[in-house]
Amino acid sequence: MKRFKHYIYILSIVFAVSSCSKPAEPIVISPEVFHASVDKVMEIQIHDIFSPPVASRVFVYPNIAAYEILAQKTQEMESLEGKIKELSAIPLADSSKDINLELAAIIAHMELSKSLIFSEEKMEVLQDSLYSDWKEKNEPEFNTAKTYAFEVVDHIKQWMDKDNYNQTRTMPKFTVDTDDPSRWQPTPPSYMDGIEPHWNKIRTFVLDSAAQFKPTKHPEFSLEEGSKFHEELMEVYDVSMEITKKGDDSEEIEIAQFWDCNPFVSVTRGHFMFATKKISPGAHWIGIVKIASRNTNSNVAQTVNAYTKTSIAIADAFISCWDEKYRSNLIRPETLINQHLDPDWLPILQTPPFPEYTSGHSVVSGAASTALTAIFGDNFAFDDDTEVPYGLPVRSFKSFNLAAEEAAVSRLYGGIHYRAAIDEGLIQGRNVGNFVVSNLKMKFE
């Protein structure tokens, strides 16, 4: 009798505990979770100081992993298999397991992002918080989605590891040609080596090759008065001097600061104090993707589509631009102005450590704005608050293309690019962007 009463007692405890536990609830993923993951990657890039080309690689692969998972359930998202270089079909989700694909997509995004950064523990802070919440809501659903996400991550990693990035890590530094006055030389204050001189060897995503959209050659190098090159050099100097006269409240100063996006430096020029720039130019445009997605109340699939297609355009734009930079190997305005015009002159922005032609901001902005226009439409007005965390005010634009044009001309205002690098860079970037648009289905229909 005592044993029976003890058994009843144990059963009553089990029943009481089970009745108090929360029933499992479906895990719902919102677009904000993807924005949070992308924002965390930006934060870590700032900490780890990724160069702009490398940063573009860190963005694009996790986006593709998330996209391919969601493409299985979303009719408007066609798989990228066969559309981007050497990507084979990912493992398909087992329909009998009723896998939460949106959950699997964000897990894959975070896990692959973690493998591409140095400070993994910083990504784990976000993961641990989300994983704990998802386990509490529905641990079986979470575990099933995570297992599948890891299968996709392994597949994408195998493809990613064949893009020649690892090989370029062991290639020689760029050799500076000091005998040719037209060739790039390291610039003050740090006189860094040219970064990523072998980036044109990275496998492209949609482009046929790094040189597919090789730009028109820059004006022939000449310091003779009246030559096209000399005129462009003098324009940089004259514009800089005129801006300086206007003072701190100059519109040109504000534009130059807003689009600086140089992860390496902080700059002081006389009484002008410039904000330390944190993010890369590609990251700035990824921030604009977030703004546009939120403004249109995009759902998870639409948000991931926008991030993925835009990041592909940005990644190919960097490969295209860097191919030209180290082919033309053109000297920066700062070097020539100090040598021949004014030894005390400083550009408003610090000159970044790589050759001049074409302008990376112009190429990347041209490509990104073209992709975004295809996704969200022309004349898409938005307030760009991407730089607010870095102490800069919001700027408003009536379209992505107008934002790209301002980003491009900011390099002239900053004193770091000639006019040809800006104009031809925009053309080059838009050519890249249009090619990506024509080969990928950009807009949800």
Image (cartoon, rainbow, N blue to C red):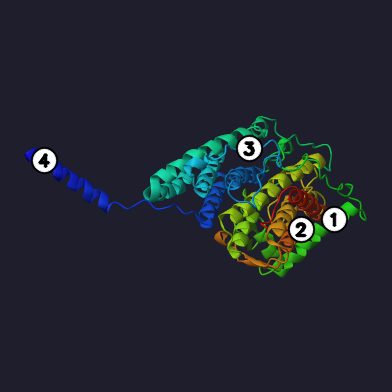
Q: Is residue 18 left or right of residue 74?
A: left
Q: Amino acid at mark 1?
A: Glu
In this view, the mark in front (4 or 3): 4
Q: Which residue is mark 1?
A: 232
Q: Amino acid at mark 3?
A: Ala
Count neighbours of disc 1 (C-alpha within 10 A) and say few if under 14, some if 14 to 19, many if 20 or more. Answer: some
Tell me residue 255's x, y (percent).
69, 63
Please state which of residues 443 and 227 is positioned toward the viewer in this rendering: 443
Say which label, 1 or 3, has the lower sequence index.
Answer: 3
Element type where label 1 sits in the image: helix
Q: CA distance from mark 4 to mark 2?
A: 88 Å
> Relative to 88, is 216 above or below?
below
Q: Amino acid at mark 2?
A: Leu
Tell me residue 185's x, y (percent).
76, 42
Count neighbours of disc 4 (C-alpha within 10 A) and say few if under 14, some if 14 to 19, many if 20 or more. Answer: few
Q: In the rendered image, which quarter contains the C terminus?
A: bottom right
Q: Which residue is mark 4?
A: 4
Q: CA distance from mark 4 to mark 1?
A: 97 Å
Residue 412: which numbered mark, if any? 2
Residue 381: which numbered mark, if any? none
Q: Which residue is mark 3?
A: 89
Say which label, 2 or 3, has the lower sequence index.
Answer: 3
Element type where label 2 sits in the image: helix
Q: Amino acid at mark 4?
A: Phe
Q: CA distance from mark 1 to mark 3?
A: 49 Å
Say which label, 4 or 1, has the lower sequence index.
Answer: 4
Say which label, 1 or 2, has the lower sequence index.
Answer: 1
